[in-house]
Amino acid sequence: MTSASATPTLLHQRLQSIDALRGLVIVFMLLDHVRETFFLHRQVGDPMAIDATDPTLFFSRTLAHLCAPVFVLLTGLSAWLYGEKYQGRSDVSAFLFKRGLFLVVLEFTLVNFAWTFQLPPSVVYMQVIWAIGVSMIALSVLVWLPRTALLVLGALIIAGHNLLDGVHFGLDSAMHVPWAILHDRGWLQVSEGLRLRTSYPVLPWIGVIALGYALGPWFARGSQPAQRQHRLLLAGLLALCGFVALRLYNGYGEAPWSGYPSITQTLMSFFNITKYPPSLLFLALTLGCGLLLLRGFERAGAARWISVLAVFGAAPMFFYLLHLYVLKLLYLACVALFGLNQGAYFGFEGIGAVWLAAVALAAALYLPVRWFAQLKGRRRDIAWLKYF
């Protein structure tokens, strides 16, 4: 009787910790998108220019680095859990292909319009939703591999793709388009009036989603929480130790760092990592932190703040679309009311206002996101809801 009553609780904590971590990185994403909307007059590069970037801006941008790697890893993990819940790999493969295709179409339509408000568009940015969609399509094939092979393949892609950094193909090469999509960020000219920007080259993200799927058995029904948390701790620490060791070596997996007269700037240089495409050290740092956070959220159990974060993580695509359109409309309203106060942009004076706006928006969006998450849970007969 005790075992029967404990099982739902353990299952709830296992799944809520995943939603809570997804919710946390969604809030970090909101912060970064507020920055991209209202602090665009202080643009940052990739990696960032240490001499020209204020530490508070550097910290805000670096914090947002957690978003994409953790989200893609959890997408792979959630795919494994989907297969456990339904009929195994055949259902997983079909679902991944359909949902991946849905995300690619969504990126080219509703998501891109939210960024540009152009119809028809002159530029289409192939960003994180595109990368997740293509990664899911790739995983729909890779799920048929044995788990060990999938784990090795994911690790090899993550660890080895920086060996390809020097490979480039000219515009006249047949490899220019596929390579720009896979690894070499750039522009693709579709027609005289339309260009595509491969903002998120997908090869490293395929490695991350494969790794997430391979971690799935740690979260299987009947798995021991203590054992899972021990594995998450070891994997997270191993990734972070690998980051520190390779960063001190300063010879592979990232642009070199250097010392500065200021300790703050030296630390900024040490943690100044490349996202487009994500370097080995970018993924080692962010995934290591993500695994440790996932362990911490599961150990936190039924804490109130965990359940609040889990609300955002339970309806991620709904939140994503909602916050993009809210931000765009807010920006247009501010321009109409106050004009352009930062050269060609309307913007906040300091990064503190960016944080305050992000907190206010998270609070404002909480109730509609909770409503949609509850609708998803209540109306399982509506098939399309699960795509959000």
Image (cartoon, rainbow, N blue to C red):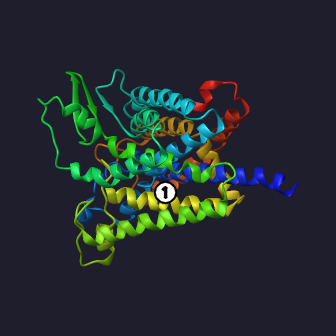
Return the residue nearer the eye: 178 or 363: 178
Return the residue nearer the eye: 199 or 55: 199
Q: In which quarter of the image is residue 270?
A: bottom left
Q: Quadrant of the N terminus?
A: bottom right
User: Residue 156 appears at what percent x and percent y?
Assistant: 34, 51
User: Residue 261 appears at what percent x and percent y?
Assistant: 24, 79
Above or below, 126 against 70 in this view is above
Estimate how packed mark 1 is, as few (under 14), some (14 to 19) or many (20 or more) residues with alpha carbons within 10 Å: some
Residue at disc 1, secondary structure: helix
- Number of marks present in the image shown: 1
For the point 34% across and 40% down, the residue is: 202
Above or below, 60 against 342 in this view is below
Return the residue nearer the eye: 171 or 354: 171
For the point 38% across and 56% down, the residue is: 283
- Residue 33 visible in the picture: no
Q: In which quarter of the image is the C terminus?
A: top right
Above or below, 30 against 53 in this view is above
For the point 38% across and 47% down, the residue is: 153
Type of residue at label 1? Trp
- Left or right, 365 with reference to 37: right
For the point 67% across and 33% down, the residue is: 376
User: Residue 206 appears at what percent x and percent y?
Assistant: 39, 42
* Residue with the mark numbered 1: 355
- Residue 194 visible in the picture: yes
User: Residue 129 appears at what percent x and percent y?
Assistant: 43, 37
Q: Which residue lies furthest to the right in this view?
A: 1
Return the residue nearer the eye: 375 or 87: 87
